[in-house]
């Protein structure tokens, strides 16, 4: 690893990286207004002939308090970028097989529908008009159909029924939520009786057909995964899709793959029976295999994602990455059906790999450096398009030859905004954590750093808990914005983090406040011992989700910090379990329920040690959204009450229109204002 790698190599002849490597005029620290003005570039889709890349550009509109997104196009070999849609809510560009049209999803007329637009520009044509809206559109290889999903009432047999039922619900003065089973709400939405069904529609304006009529399950199920959940067979006669048909979805991660004829009229056929999660079918070009990714441990959403291939003739399932101890993200077949490309998180970066489609193959790095989170491969297998970002610049689109050579930056959406900014690169460091295990951290110095001065330090703890701090740009927790006022920002990936092997991830089970806490404190000790410019008397800590939990835990176990910021943190694990929605993650991580393993719930609850708040008396800012169903905001009310009752300086901020994350631009402005204001009060 090391400092040079974090810089991503100043030898890249690309403008954004040149900004980070060459100083042509005095630069200033980044401010919130700089960050919120940045264009968010995503979803690169390379044309079948490999000559063009379609992608999404989304820009926050502060006045409207939402983001505006449109489809753009650029030559894969570099050249002028051009905007091809102006609907303001346009996403998911997908090329037609002949490369002449681009399908996309837009809510320009109210509900989300599929549109297509000519590669050469012109007016967009609306393909679907379902009252229930659409998502996940995919072209058939022959270009005659599109598959998509729509949330419908399972017992409705047409759009008129769905439209009428929605109208009745909208007009009713009664808005009660009624539940007879779990997962009655999820993230920010209450269950409304609808299910996401799989549809096909002819591209010549045919009527949509429901391929999963009556299904009391979702296609696809909710997920945190990257691969497409729907795929056509190469001959366009069959669709493979992902679904979780288990009754108790709050307890199940058991997604499976099913196939169904595109003509409908047949029950879907299950082709995977793994008790863990199977997700994301991708047919090989020769039609012999279906690639997918799988987790083998039931009820554990952070088990290692393996790359599997299914033999359509024999029914055999082959683990391609059995000996690869990293998570496979999305993937694409080579045109000869002999290998697959995929990105995988590795030590705070995300290279792109190629692996032979054979048992226990050894993946080799193709795109060696950087955090490359999204990618697509041209139909001829000669060119890759991918998004790349780092802690010093937001995502832009890059391209390269399929062997990894000829990397070049294609988009420059944020070059003008970045040009005047001083964004110090992250520096990686390793230290011995709990039980002598090697742990990695990242350190960001403030702009205009002077080693002869003393700086306050902010420790950030990531969420998950099975997540990681990567050399990747972020908007909700941006270390550059947090370092800008003059803080050294430290991000440590303790036990439970991803990108360091499955054993490292698994070691947080039934140990939420154990080894991870030791890893973090050992990391703080290491940073202070090796960086004399940090003032050890001015330390702060902040985190969200599991990071918020760890904030609450640290606040009850040490007085070494001057202040804390806890966002959406579990505080009392018994009441947290009773009100959250996805139960499997708590039952896995705490080895049971509050009534089968009460000792663990008590042992690892910060609320058990609430009396320590009064002992350490460390000020805390507490934040959450009232629509947060993952970590219900009552957790924040509980800790705020405990702080106030013990006379600890504390402040509570609740956003009534936000969930687990603060997403609206104006709310984000307030979030950063309060976050930085709290630090300034206690560190400056």
Image (cartoon, rainbow, N blue to C red):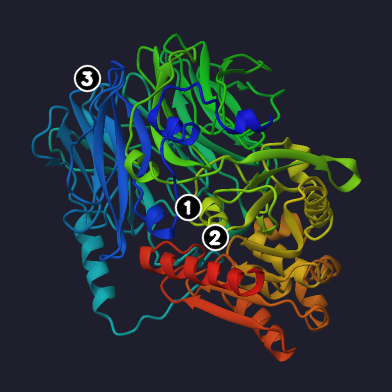
Numbered label tally: 3
Q: Which residue, given by chain and number where applicable, does mark 2 sit on?
A: 485
How far is disc 1 from disc 2 in space, using C-alphas? 8 Å
Q: Mark 3: give few (<14), some (14-19) or many (20+) Cα within 10 Å.
A: few
In this rendering, the answer to whether 393 lies above or below 353 is below
Q: Secondary structure at mark 2?
A: loop
Q: Are marks 1 and 2 in contact (CB under 8 Å)?
A: yes
Task: Residue 220: tell me if it is visible.
Answer: yes
Front position in the image: 73 or 379? 73
Q: Identify the residue at horizontal 41%, vertical 12% (top origin).
A: 335
Q: Mark 2: give few (<14), some (14-19) or many (20+) Cα within 10 Å.
A: some
Name the side, left or right, on which 429 lies relative to 545: right
Residue 96 spot, x, y in % from top left: 24, 26
Name the side, left or right, on which 368 lies relative to 74: right
Q: Earlier in the sequence, mark 1 or mark 2?
A: 1
Name the side, left or right, on which 527 lies relative to 306: right
How far is disc 2 from disc 3 in space, using C-alphas? 52 Å
């Amino acid at each position: 690893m090391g400092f040079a790698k974090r810089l991503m190599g100043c030898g890249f002849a690309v403008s954004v990286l040149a900004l980070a490597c060459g100083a042509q005029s005095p630069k200033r620290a980044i401010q919130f207004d700089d960050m919120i003005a940045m264009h968010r570039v995503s979803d690169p889709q390379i044309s079948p002939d490999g000559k063009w890349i379609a992608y999404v550009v989304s820009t926050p509109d502060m006045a409207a308090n939402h983001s505006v997104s449109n489809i753009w196009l650029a030559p894969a070999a570099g050249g002028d970028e051009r905007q091809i849609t102006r609907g303001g809510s346009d996403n998911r560009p997908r090329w037609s097989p002949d490369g002449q049209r681009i399908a996309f999803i837009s809510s320009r007329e109210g509900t989300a529908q599929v549109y297509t637009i000519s590669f050469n520009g012109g007016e967009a044509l609306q393909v679907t008009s379902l009252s229930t809206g659409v998502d996940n559109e995919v072209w058939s290889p022959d270009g005659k159909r599109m598959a998509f999903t729509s949330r419908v009432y399972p017992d409705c047999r047409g759009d008129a029924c769905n439209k009428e039922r929605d109208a009745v619900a909208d007009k009713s003065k009664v808005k009660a939520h009624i539940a007879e089973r779990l997962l009655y709400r999820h993230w920010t939405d209450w269950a409304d009786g609808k299910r996401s069904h799989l549809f096909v529609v002819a591209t010549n304006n045919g009527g949509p057909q429901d391929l999963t009529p009556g299904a009391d399950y979702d296609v696809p199920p909710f997920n945190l995964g990257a691969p497409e959940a729907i795929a056509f067979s190469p001959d366009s006669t069959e669709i493979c899709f992902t679904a979780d048909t288990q009754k108790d979805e709050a307890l199940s991660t058991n997604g499976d793959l099913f196939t169904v004829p595109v003509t409908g009229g047949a029950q879907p056929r299950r082709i995977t029976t793994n008790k863990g999660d199977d997700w994301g079918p991708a047919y090989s070009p020769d039609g012999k295999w279906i690639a997918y990714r799988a987790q083998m441990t039931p009820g554990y959403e952070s088990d290692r994602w393996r790359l599997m291939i299914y033999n359509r003739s024999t029914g055999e399932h082959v683990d391609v990455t059995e000996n690869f101890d990293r998570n496979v993200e999305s993937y694409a077949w080579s045109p000869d059906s002999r290998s697959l490309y995929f990105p995988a998180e590795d030590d705070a970066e995300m290279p792109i790999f190629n692996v032979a489609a054979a048992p226990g193959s050894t993946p080799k790095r193709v795109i060696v450096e950087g955090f490359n989170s999204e990618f697509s491969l041209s139909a001829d297998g000669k060119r890759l398009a991918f998004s790349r970002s780092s802690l010093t610049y937001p995502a832009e689109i890059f391209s390269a030859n399929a062997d990894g050579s000829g990397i070049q930056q294609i988009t420059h959406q944020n070059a003008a905004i970045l040009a005047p900014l001083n964004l110090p690169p992250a520096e990686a460091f390793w230290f011995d954590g709990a039980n002598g295990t090697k742990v990695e951290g990242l350190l960001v110095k403030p702009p205009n750093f002077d080693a002869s001065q003393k700086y306050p330090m902010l420790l950030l703890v990531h969420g998950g808990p099975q997540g990681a701090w990567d050399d990747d740009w972020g908007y909700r927790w941006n270390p550059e914005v947090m370092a800008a006022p003059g803080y050294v920002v430290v991000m440590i990936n303790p036990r439970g983090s991803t990108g360091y092997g499955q054993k490292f991830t698994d070691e947080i089970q039934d140990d939420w406040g154990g080894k991870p806490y030791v890893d973090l404190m050992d990391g703080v000790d290491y940073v202070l011992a090796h960086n004399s410019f940090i003032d050890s008397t001015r330390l702060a800590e902040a985190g969200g989700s599991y990071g918020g939990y760890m904030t609450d835990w640290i606040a009850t176990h040490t007085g070494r910090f001057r202040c804390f910021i806890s966002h959406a943190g579990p505080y009392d694990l018994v009441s947290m379990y009773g009100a959250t929605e996805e139960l499997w993650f708590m039952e896995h991580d705490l080895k049971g329920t509050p009534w089968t393993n009460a000792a663990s719930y008590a042992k690892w609850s910060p609320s058990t040690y609430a009396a320590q708040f009064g002992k350490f008396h460390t000020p805390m800012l507490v934040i959450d959204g009232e629509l947060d169903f993952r970590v219900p905001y009552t957790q924040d009310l509980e800790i705020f009450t405990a702080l106030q009752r013990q006379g600890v300086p504390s402040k509570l901020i609740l956003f009534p229109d936000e969930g687990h994350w603060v997403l609206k631009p104006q709310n984000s402005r307030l979030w950063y204002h309060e976050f930085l204001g709290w630090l300034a009060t206690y560190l400056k």
